[in-house]
Amino acid sequence: RWWEESEGYDEHMVAWGGENIDQSLRAWLCGGRIEIAEGAFVAHMWRDSNNPKTQLKYPMPSEAVMRNKARASMAWLSEFQNKTLSFPEYDQFHSGDNKIGDMSNFDRLRKRRNCAPFSAYIQRFSYIYINGGLIPEEIFQLQEERSGLCLERSPRSSVPHDVVLAPCAGLQQGGVP
């Protein structure tokens, strides 16, 4: 019943990736709940490039996965979405170079189910996020004095990611020298 009431999967997502974010936030923010089913087991097969048995048997463009995650972020993170979209992996969506598609299905669902904003999720789990110290009281960047640039993570297709000097994000005055 909940599946129909919450409109199931986002029809604009492609393949897989991001639906876990969408579905969990959809449940918590729109009046559903997530329960533990004793005795149930969920498995996930991790891919090992050295093991032919675990190799992907179909193409999975990472751009589609990032698009799905961007859709989920824009749908449910409310005023917090800009933080997520500020990560380099989302540059193409934040800049508008790559479109995430029609989001009206989320607008309809939020209105019909009277969904709460993401701040309600943070409050619901304040013992983890606020009391547990996962949301810092202040943040800063490391800024090189000579160039005025800040240390930033630069994603690569596989870990480890690079670290580079780039324009400082956030406040106009930049990072902390």
Image (tube, grey):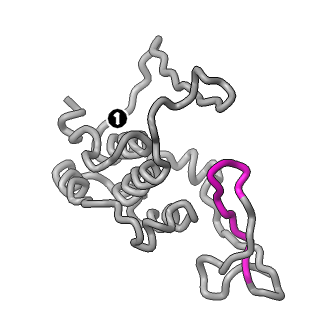
- Up the image or down, 66 lies above or below 49; here it is below
Q: Badge 1, how many Cα within 10 Å: few under 14, some, many 20+?
A: few
What residue sits right under mark 1 in the picture?
Answer: 33
Q: Residue at x 59, y 29 (%)?
A: 46
Magenta segment: 149-161
Q: Name the element at disc 1.
A: loop
Q: Residue at x 45, y 15 (%)?
A: 40
Comparing 41 with 103, the one in front is 103
The percent position of residue 51, horizontal first and vertical second, equals 65, 24
The percent position of residue 58, horizontal first and vertical second, equals 45, 34
The percent position of residue 79, horizontal first and vertical second, equals 42, 66
Q: Amino acid at mark 1?
A: Arg
Relative horizontal placement of residue 57, taking residue 142 as reference (left or right): left
Q: Residue at x 66, y 87 (%)?
A: 173
Instruction: Decide whether residue 18 is among the magenta residues.
Output: no
The percent position of residue 44, horizontal first and vertical second, equals 52, 26
Comparing 141 with 86, the one in front is 86
Toward which corner of the image does residue 177 lie, by quadrant? bottom right
Instruction: Decide whether residue 151 is among the magenta residues.
Output: yes
Relative horizontal placement of residue 26, taking residue 143 as reference (left or right): left
In the picture as drawn, the residue positioned furthest to the top comes out as: 39
Toward which corner of the image does residue 67 lie, by quadrant? bottom left
Q: Exactly how many numbered labels are in the figure?
A: 1
Q: Quadrant of the N terminus?
A: top left
**Magenta stretch prevailing secondary structure:** loop
